[in-house]
């Protein structure tokens, strides 16, 4: 028997919800969005009508009081993730919260305690692990196709000009490391199958808003493996991940935001020369990673099992981010 459909509410009408997650519900098999809340009741009604959502609420508390909802997705500003995740758990809802799950590992640990106390599950919305290109990338690494994988290099940048934007607000948990820095850590942990042992970061902060706008970082993993990554919110839009092994390298062309309606490509080069003589290209079928994430979460809830990459995984990632922020002030390697 197929798992039943889980009834979802969306707590906020943020851009990522409107552009990515609400459209993805239309492609799911086990997740149904039936309610949406926004602080502006008119905004809630407009977005709900756009996506055919049955109920629109003018406050988050109203949505959480809806007894028909089993799970909520939270795309609120970073500083609101902790309080509204806690309130959603206390209201008896399972929670899929946008990254970062909180602003520190201690806050994430508070969420873990509430999850246990309330008997509801929480996951952080790093959707990339559900895309088939990352399933294939991990399979290639584990198969030994690259030999021994020793290094991951990642770059993620976009241009967010100074101004009235939540990503520019330190009070709201803005800055590049909180916004997109966790992706490289998720990828390296996923591919290496281990946790970082020590980390160091180099930060450039916006002189007006004081959020980090360009951060480079290194992380040491067991067996001499290394992650080197950079994130920027004031440079040209770029994404790349390259995995280096003793017998080849793997390039993921669109690692973080692949389009749902077109295939992606994995480039495997055995390094026989510098001109691509040993290059092989694998095409990976198009997929909506947001829909896959929603379905995986919903199926776990419906079947009474642990959701993929639950709160313990989120705590691990937050510890790494905490260590990088500490390194900014200490100038030294820090342990997660």
Image: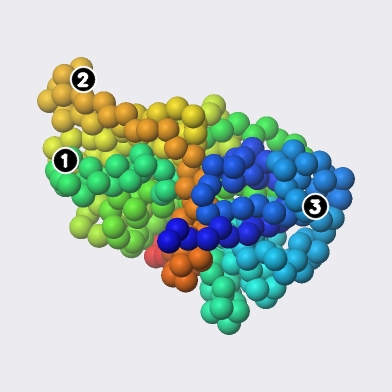
Circle 2 packing at 10 Å, graded few (<14), some (14-19), many (20+), is few
Instruction: Give the residue at mark 2.
Output: 276
Residue 249 higher or lower than 178, as above or below:
above
Instruction: Give the residue at mark 1.
Output: 145
Judged from the image, the secondary structure of the residue bearing numbered disc 1 is loop
Q: Which of 45 and 148 is in front in this view?
A: 45
The image quadrant that residue 52 belongs to is: top right
Q: Distance between the residues labelled 2 and 3?
A: 54 Å
Where residue 55 appears, as percent x and y from the top left, is: 78, 53
Instruction: Give the residue at mark 3.
Output: 56
Is residue 286 shown left or right of residue 177? left
Q: Nearer the viewer, residue 181 or 34?
A: 34
Q: How far apart are marks 2 and 1 (CA)?
A: 17 Å
Residue 204 higher or lower than 98, as above or below:
above
Nearer the camera: disc 2 or disc 1: 1
Circle 1 packing at 10 Å, graded few (<14), some (14-19), many (20+), is some
């Amino acid at each position: 028997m197929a798992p039943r459909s889980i009834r979802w509410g969306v707590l906020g009408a943020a851009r990522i919800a409107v552009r990515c997650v609400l459209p993805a519900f239309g492609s799911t098999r086990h997740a149904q969005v039936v309610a949406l809340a926004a602080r502006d009741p008119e905004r809630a009604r407009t977005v709900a009508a756009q996506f055919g959502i049955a109920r629109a609420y003018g406050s988050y508390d109203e949505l959480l009081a809806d007894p028909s909802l089993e799970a909520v997705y939270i795309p609120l500003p970073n500083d609101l993730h902790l309080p509204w995740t806690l309130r959603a758990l206390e209201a008896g809802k399972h929670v899929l919260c946008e990254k970062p799950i909180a602003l520190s590992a201690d806050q994430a640990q508070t969420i873990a305690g509430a999850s246990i106390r309330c008997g509801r599950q929480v996951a952080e919305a790093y959707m990339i692990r559900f895309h088939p290109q990352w399933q294939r990338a991990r399979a290639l690494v584990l198969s030994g196709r690259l030999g021994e994988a020793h290094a991951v290099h990642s770059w993620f940048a976009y241009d967010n000009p100074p101004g009235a934007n939540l990503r520019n607000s330190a009070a709201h948990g803005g800055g590049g490391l909180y916004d997109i820095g966790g992706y490289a850590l998720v990828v390296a942990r996923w591919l290496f199958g281990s946790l970082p042992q020590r980390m160091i970061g180099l930060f450039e902060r916006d002189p007006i808003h004081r959020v980090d706008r360009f951060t480079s970082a290194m992380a040491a993993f067991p067996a001499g493996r290394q992650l080197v990554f950079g994130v920027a919110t004031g440079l040209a839009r770029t994404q790349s991940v390259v995995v280096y092994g003793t017998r080849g390298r793997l390039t993921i062309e669109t690692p973080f935001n692949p389009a749902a309606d077109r295939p992606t490509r994995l480039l495997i080069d055995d390094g026989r020369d510098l001109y691509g003589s040993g290059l092989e290209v694998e095409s990976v079928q198009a997929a909506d990673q947001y829909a896959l994430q929603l379905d995986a979460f919903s199926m776990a809830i419906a079947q009474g099992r642990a959701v993929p990459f639950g709160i313990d995984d989120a705590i691990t990632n937050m510890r790494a981010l905490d260590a990088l922020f500490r390194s900014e002030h200490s100038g030294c390697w820090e342990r997660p």
